[in-house]
Image (spheres, rainbow, N blue to C red):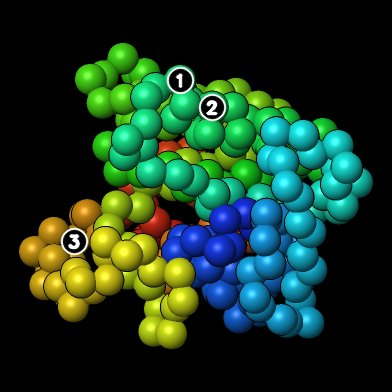
Amino acid sequence: MKVKAIVTGATGMVGEGVLRECLQHDDVEQVLVVGRRPCGVSHPKLKEVLTSDFFNLSAIAGELKGYNACFFCLGVSSVGMKEPEYTHLTYDLTINFAQTVVKQNDGMVFCYVSGAATDSSEKGRSMWARVKGRTENELMRMPFGKAYMFRPGLMMPEPGSKNILKWARPFLWLYPILHFLFPAGSCKLKEVGTAMINTVTKGYEKPILEVRDIVALAGR
């Protein structure tokens, strides 16, 4: 099966890494990047659609038809936010996008980048984890062909990446040490991208993928 994927968040660290892997992977035939600003990448497989409002996608809905995968890598930090604001920018935004693409594409595989320690019960003390858990749960109830929740933990970007988070840059040299000491808490962004592609071509037995699942699926 050839993959035709929609990718969001391509101007962020995770989305950039997933996009890069999609463009390099032989099983990916076409990629549509949806974002607020250009991702700065040119490639024969790549098409880009810009929108100023992820809460109203009516103007671009027709462009989202004809794809069998969506790799949703768009997200914001909860630092400094109250729960209503974070919920709006995480749960509301994601679900609105998912509702739009699922209407346009029967049998689509949807991959959502969540986070390690996401709270599936939606009742824990951590605000961001509750909101992410609520988002995961709603996505898994939607009529996708398959929906996978990615909880990657610490991620190592590929050399030459442009959108590395500022706080992460000073710690990149520590990745080999941290990965050796805590292999279940870290993976490479290349593995995240490959695992997403493999959810479409090979599938996976679990809907929620922790680090060990991501690494295992990437190696298939």
Q: Mark 2 and mark 1 in contact? Answer it, CB < 8 Å.
A: yes
User: If you read the primary sequence from the N terminus, does the residue marked by circle 3 or circle 1 appear first?
Assistant: 1
Secondary structure under the numbered disc 2 in the rendered image: helix
Residue in the picture at 45% in, 20% down: 84
Asked where in the image residue 13 lies, by quadrant, the reply is bottom left
Seen in the picture, residue 193 relative to 43 is either above or below; the reply is above
The residue at which mark 1 appears reads as 84
Q: Distance between the Cα atoms at labels 3 and 1?
A: 34 Å
Can residue 51 be seen by looking at this rendering? yes
The residue at which mark 2 appears reads as 88
Asked where in the image residue 100 lies, by quadrant, the reply is top right
Residue in the picture at 53% in, 68% down: 16
Q: Which mark is residue 5?
A: none
Question: Farthest residue toward the top?
Answer: 123
Seen in the picture, residue 138 relative to 187 is either above or below; the reply is above
Residue in the picture at 62% in, 40% down: 146
Q: Distance between the Cα atoms at labels 2 and 1?
A: 6 Å
Q: Residues within 10 Å of mark 2 (few under 14, many from 20)?
A: few
